[in-house]
């Protein structure tokens, strides 16, 4: 008997997919769906930002195109940007100039391929994991790709042949590189706790005990602040500080190239929010129930967990926008001092703390579970109290100037008043 | 003697960044759900004050002619020199304006013309939508000034003329 084509075979819906043809077909379908949803979400985010900013400022926001909600505003903006003239600065490096918008946009998009967005979907061809690629090195992949995002901005600044763009590019490279260290280090406790770098394993670990936001609150806060900086959002939007740099790295861009930078910013927000939801809020895990992550998997479970994931991601997206319309921009030295003198030492110290705690818990025989989580939570609350009450009294962000010690001032004064200068005045 | 600059230290206890940020975020969240103050312009209109000084209007007598007697007070008081008046006289010796034009583009809407007018003829009005496609379009002649129908400005509050 001739063997049936794999697509025609009916297998157990709960069993993982076998066979290359089915795997490839499902991968392509997932790719297309995720890409489409992602692009639409990024476009709608431009509307969401304008709406939320308007509401915060007591206005109504776009409400002319597409009914009272202004739903067609992203489409109108898109058409406008396609119709506009592409300008190119004189003596610009043309290949890099064209490549930069894509380079800033693509890394944000690629990261999505390893983020699981719902519980597995049973089909007649087997169980489909709802993640485009469940890489065994998922987490390292994210760190590797996310750090490529800086190239788009730096190249845009460099290729524009414009001093403002160049300064914006320089700033962003300094900012993104310094905050990436804190970002990477704040996630090490997550890996310590999960014992694995696969995204689905990190989610499973969280659904079995407590979400990492309770287990590792300090790491979550550091990750959150660092991803604000990584996405160049207020209060860390120094690369495009319009009061100093016109528009920073995208000063010279127009039409769809500019629009691509805009989309890239929102794409980065979506990705960062999804990452935070996955690493710290249990991904697609529905809280207070183990029902959703146990076999048998059903379509209902898939839909509910997808909704849960979208809610968590949406919440973080909202917080991103909310912060943008509340907080003013940092000064450059404050940004650097926060990054290097607070975030990185805090992240490092926290790694040591968590590693030591896990070792001690293992030594005294506390298994991962409620008690384990409770101990970690208590430790985090103590750390946070210490952090907020003791340190945050005008010291986390340095004040307008830091007053030098009296002795030092006297010494500096003594040195600056040179004998020749005073003699010159006397004569 | 060395000149010293007084250096003011920041209040350390009150300069917590996190607390202030959280307070600010609470405030912006509160504003998000408060009623919006936008007036959606083409559909909704701002209610003008009775003292609003906008587009001019020439009032008329019962016989439909302009009340203006071409005395020349308004062009002489006009600070932006936007009123053009050529006086004429009919067979009964009554003066009337041969040419009376106001350039709304030059006008600063001070209302002096209305204040100075002895015949209660020229007025600034409660009206503001006077955009045009050309500069010439802003020059209102006598017919156009007489054809305006909007309410005229009171310039001051009649119940409280001294602004007390």
Image (tube, rainbow, N blue to C red):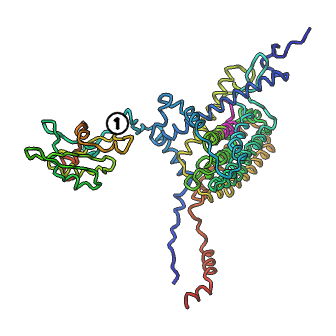
Q: Nearer the viewer, residue A149 or A343?
A: A149
**Residue at position x 62%, y 31% in the image:** A40
Considering every residue shown, the one lying at the far left of the view is B92
Q: Which residue is mark 1?
A: B45
The N terminus of chain A, quarter of image:
top right
| Vertical comparison of A258 with A173: above or below | above
Q: In the rendered structure, does residue B20 fall within the stretch colored magenta?
A: no
Name the side, left or right, on which A275 lies relative to B6. Answer: right
Q: Which residues are magenta?
A: A271-288
Displayed quadrant of residue A421: bottom right
Q: x and y percent of residue A215 in the render?
A: 69, 41
Q: Nearer the viewer, residue B63 or B33?
A: B63
Q: x and y percent of residue A317 in the render?
A: 60, 38
Instruction: Return the chain for callout 1.
Output: B
Displayed quadrant of residue A397: bottom right
Q: x and y percent of residue A240 in the render?
A: 60, 50
Does residue B142 show up? Answer: yes
Name the side, left or right, on which A20 lies relative to A212. Answer: right
Considering every residue shown, the one lying at the far front of the view is B91
**Residue at position x 64%, y 29% in the image:** A308
Considering every residue shown, the one lying at the far top of the view is A1
The C terminus of chain A, quarter of image:
bottom right
Q: x and y percent of residue A278 in the render?
A: 69, 36
Name the side, left or right, on which A231 lies relative to B22. Answer: right
Considering every residue shown, the one lying at the far bottom of the view is A427
**Residue at position x 67%, y 36% in the image:** A274
Binning the other alpha carbons within 10 Å of mark 1 as few (below 14), some (14 to 19) or many (20 upward) gives few
Q: In the rendered structure, does residue A274 fall within the stretch colored magenta?
A: yes
């Amino acid at each position: 008997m001739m063997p049936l084509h794999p697509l025609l075979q009916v297998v157990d819906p709960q069993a993982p997919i076998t066979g290359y043809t089915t795997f490839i077909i499902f991968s392509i379908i997932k790719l297309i769906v995720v890409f489409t949803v992602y692009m639409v979400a990024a476009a709608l985010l431009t509307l969401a930002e304008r709406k939320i900013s308007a509401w915060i400022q007591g206005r109504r926001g776009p409400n002319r195109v597409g009914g009272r909600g202004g739903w067609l505003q992203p489409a109108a903006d898109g058409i406008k940007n396609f119709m506009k003239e592409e300008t190119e600065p004189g003596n610009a490096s043309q290949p890099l100039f064209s490549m930069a918008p894509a380079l800033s946009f693509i890394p944000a998009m690629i990261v999505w391929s390893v983020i699981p967005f719902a519980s597995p979907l049973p089909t007649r061809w087997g169980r489909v994991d709802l993640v485009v690629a469940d890489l065994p090195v998922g987490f390292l992949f994210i760190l590797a790709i996310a750090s490529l995002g800086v190239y788009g901005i730096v190249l845009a600044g460099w290729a524009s042949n414009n001093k403002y763009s160049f300064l914006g590019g320089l700033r962003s490279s300094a900012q993104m590189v310094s905050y990436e260290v804190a970002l990477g280090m704040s996630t090490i406790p997550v890996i310590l706790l999960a014992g694995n770098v696969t995204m689905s394993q990190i989610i499973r670990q969280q659904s079995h005990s407590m979400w990492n936001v309770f287990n590792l609150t300090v790491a979550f806060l550091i990750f959150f602040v660092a991803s604000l900086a990584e996405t160049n959002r207020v209060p860390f939007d120094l690369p495009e500080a319009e009061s100093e740099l016109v528009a920073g790295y995208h000063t010279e861009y127009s039409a769809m190239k500019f629009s691509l930078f805009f989309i890239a910013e929102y794409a980065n927000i979506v990705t960062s929010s999804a990452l935070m939801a996955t690493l710290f809020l249990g991904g697609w895990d529905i809280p207070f129930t183990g029902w959703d992550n146990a076999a048998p998997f059903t379509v209902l479970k898939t839909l509910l967990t997808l909704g849960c994931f979208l809610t968590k991601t949406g919440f973080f997206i909202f917080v991103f926008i909310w912060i943008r319309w509340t907080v003013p921009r940092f000064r450059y030295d404050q940004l650097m001092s926060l990054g290097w003198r607070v975030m990185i030492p805090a992240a490092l110290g926290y790694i040591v703390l968590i590693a030591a705690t896990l070792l001690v818990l293992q030594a005294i025989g506390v298994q991962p579970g409620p008690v384990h989580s409770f101990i970690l939570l208590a430790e985090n609350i103590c750390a946070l109290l210490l952090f907020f009450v003791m340190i945050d009294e005008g010291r986390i962000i340095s004040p307008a100037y830091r007053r030098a010690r009296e002795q030092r001032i006297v010494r500096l004064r003594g040195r600056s008043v040179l004998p020749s200068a005073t003699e010159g005045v006397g004569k | 003697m060395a000149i010293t600059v007084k250096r003011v230290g920041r209040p350390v206890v009150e300069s917590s960044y996190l607390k202030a940020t959280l307070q600010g975020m609470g405030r912006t969240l509160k504003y998000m759900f408060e009623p919006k103050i936008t007036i959606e312009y083409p559909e909704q209109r701002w209610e003008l004050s009775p003292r609003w000084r906008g587009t001019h209007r020439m009032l008329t007598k019962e016989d439909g002619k302009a009340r203006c007697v071409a005395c020349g007070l308004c062009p002489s008081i006009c600070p932006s020199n936007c009123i053009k008046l050529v006086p004429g006289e009919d067979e009964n010796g009554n003066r009337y304006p041969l040419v009376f034009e106001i350039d709304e583009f030059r006008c600063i809407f001070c209302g002096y013309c209305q204040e100075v007018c002895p015949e209660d003829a020229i007025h600034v009005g409660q009206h503001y939508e006077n955009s045009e496609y050309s500069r010439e379009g802003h020059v209102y002649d006598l017919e156009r000034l007489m054809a305006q129908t909007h309410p005229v400005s009171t310039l001051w509050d009649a119940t409280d003329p001294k602004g007390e």
